[in-house]
Amino acid sequence: MNDRTCIVTRKTAETDDLIRFVVGPDSAVVPDLKRSLPGRGCWVSADRATVDKASAKGHFARAFKKQVIVPPELGAMVEGLFVRSALGALGLARKAGAVALGAAKVDSVVRSGKAALVLHAFEASEDGVRKITQARRATAHLGGPAIPAYKLFAEADLGLALGGTNVIHAAVLASDAGKAAVKRMVALDRYRGGSPDDLAMIAAVAGDDDAAEDME
């Protein structure tokens, strides 16, 4: 019942996989991430490439059946909204006790299976990321959850959202308080094109399982 059709791909999808746009009083196209603005809306797949195509190829004018003003940096504007939404949700999760900070604590909650998502700052060292990746792989290999990991923010942005300094590694816990933050991190990552890290981890875990079976 909640499915909508993307004006670019013409594919039907759930509203969570799309972005709603409306036309403001000044005839400008406005992103409506919360799907709460009044007026007739149109829908675009929730990724930067499709939003950029809709902007460049006249899809909004055809969808609204009138001349509209498309901001020249609409794709970047939408990304900024996703970033602010994700960081805001992360801050709320932190206040609710649903975020672990620091490499040691992140490693611990990952191995316990309590983490729903791992965040590495852009500045994170390869060695730090590698150690936590090993913990994620070990957890999945032992039958625990396959915990995704993302590089979405700079250290300064993470520190501002989480009320700390030098925030390089963080984990959102798999609790009710962490669900909203996880949802927004995944949406931001999807908008930017997705992370190959998780596919590589899942493939590595599968490879380990196959190797173990061959040895039996």
Image (cartoon, rainbow, N blue to C red):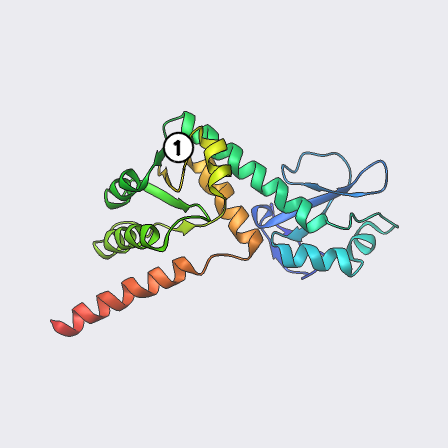
Identify the residue at horizontal 67%, vertical 48% (top origin). Answer: 76
Tally the marks. Answer: 1
- Location of mark 1 (residue): 176
Quadrant in the picture for residue 23: top right
Would residue 4 appear left or right of 73 to someone viewing this image? left
Residue 11 pos. (x, y %): 64, 60
Residue 216 pos. (x, y %): 11, 71
Would residue 26 appear left or right of 137 to someone viewing this image? right
Q: Residues within 10 Å of mark 1 (few under 14, many from 20)?
A: few
Quadrant in the picture for residue 206: bottom left
Placement of 150 over or under 166, stated as above or below: below
Residue 72 pos. (x, y %): 77, 51
Identify the residue at horizontal 23%, vertical 54% (top origin). Answer: 138
- The answer to which of 7 and 173 lies nearer the viewer is 173
Q: Residue furthest bottom?
A: 214
Q: Can residue 149 be seen at all in this image of the molecule?
A: yes
